[in-house]
Image: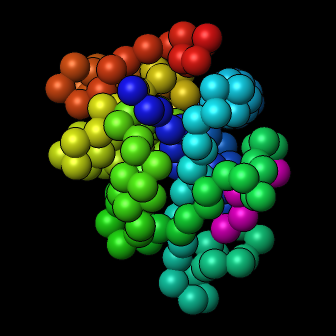
């Protein structure tokens, strides 16, 4: 089964914002390890950037919109695209790019667990993709209602089975 890696919204404005993502250094390390293993397996890598409207802090091209400097991005080889909604598919050509590459399975990592990661996992399944969600490969920030750790645990449990195959990142392309 042809597999691609999809990295969602790991951008300066979210990663270095006033509220830091839960276990941000560990998650960054996990994502970078997956990037290296995807490259070794010749799996395509897609980076999604959440893009706000003109004048917003994350408008296209702004400093906060940039992918986080600690990511191992190869812009000459990796696929970078912009999105304006929680789904990586809505209003983008991601589905067409994946179809052209004959991708059947997506490994999804990044931010934020309860918004873009959750939505993209669900939509990917609706579009016919098999989805692997490394339980240790996505993150978010604390909210007034729940800690980031609780949000991540809840989404791992909720998405497992019906929407995603749940694994540890170390077991992908190992």
Relative to residue 164, is residue 43 depicted above or below? below
Provide residue 78's location: percent of width, then percent of height.
67, 52
> Is residue 155 among what the camera can see?
no
For the image, the number of numbered tags is 0
The residue shown at (35%, 48%) is: 120
Residue at the (22%, 19%) spot, across then down: 161
Say above or below: 94 vs 58: above
Residue 4 appears in view: yes
Judge left or right: residue 29 versus residue 57: right
Magenta segment, principal secondary structure?
A: loop
**Quadrant (top left, top right, bottom left, bottom right) of the C terminus:** top right
Q: Quadrant of residue 79?
A: bottom right
Q: Is residue 118 magenta?
A: no
Q: Between 106 and 54, which is closer to the camera in this rendering?
A: 106
Q: Nearer the viewer, residue 25 or 67?
A: 67
The scheme the figure's colours follow is: rainbow
Q: For the N terminus, which image quadrant?
A: top left
Q: Residue furthest bottom?
A: 54
Residue at position x 54%, y 17% in the image: 172
Would you place residue 160 above or below residue 82 in this image? above
Residue at image point 37% right, 52% down: 99
**x, y (%) of residue 50?**
53, 64
**Nearer-the-camera pick, 146 or 149:** 149
Residue 146, quarter of the rendered image? top left
Relative placement, left or right, of 157 versus 58 is left
Highlighted magenta segment, given as a residue range: 65-69
Position of residue 43 measured from the top left corner of the image (x, y, whole percent): 58, 35
Relative to 54, 127 lies left or right? left
User: Residue 63, located in which quarter of the rendered image?
Assistant: bottom right
């Amino acid at each position: 089964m042809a597999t691609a890696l999809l990295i969602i919204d790991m951008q300066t404005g979210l990663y270095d914002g006033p509220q830091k993502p839960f276990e941000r250094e560990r998650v960054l390390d996990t994502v970078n390890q997956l990037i290296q293993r995807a490259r070794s397996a010749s799996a395509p890598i897609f980076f999604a950037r959440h893009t706000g409207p003109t004048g917003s802090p994350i408008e296209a091209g702004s400093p906060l919109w940039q992918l986080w400097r600690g990511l191992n991005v190869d812009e000459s080889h990796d696929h970078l695209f912009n999105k304006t909604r929680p789904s990586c598919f809505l209003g983008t050509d991601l589905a067409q790019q994946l179809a052209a590459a004959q991708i059947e399975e997506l490994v999804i990592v990044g931010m934020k667990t309860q918004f873009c990661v959750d939505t993209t996992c669900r939509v990917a399944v609706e579009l016919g993709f098999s989805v692997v969600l490394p339980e240790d490969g996505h993150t978010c920030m604390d909210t007034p209602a729940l800690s980031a750790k609780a949000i991540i645990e809840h989404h791992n449990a909720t998405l497992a089975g019906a929407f995603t195959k749940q694994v540890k990142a170390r077991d992908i392309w190992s």
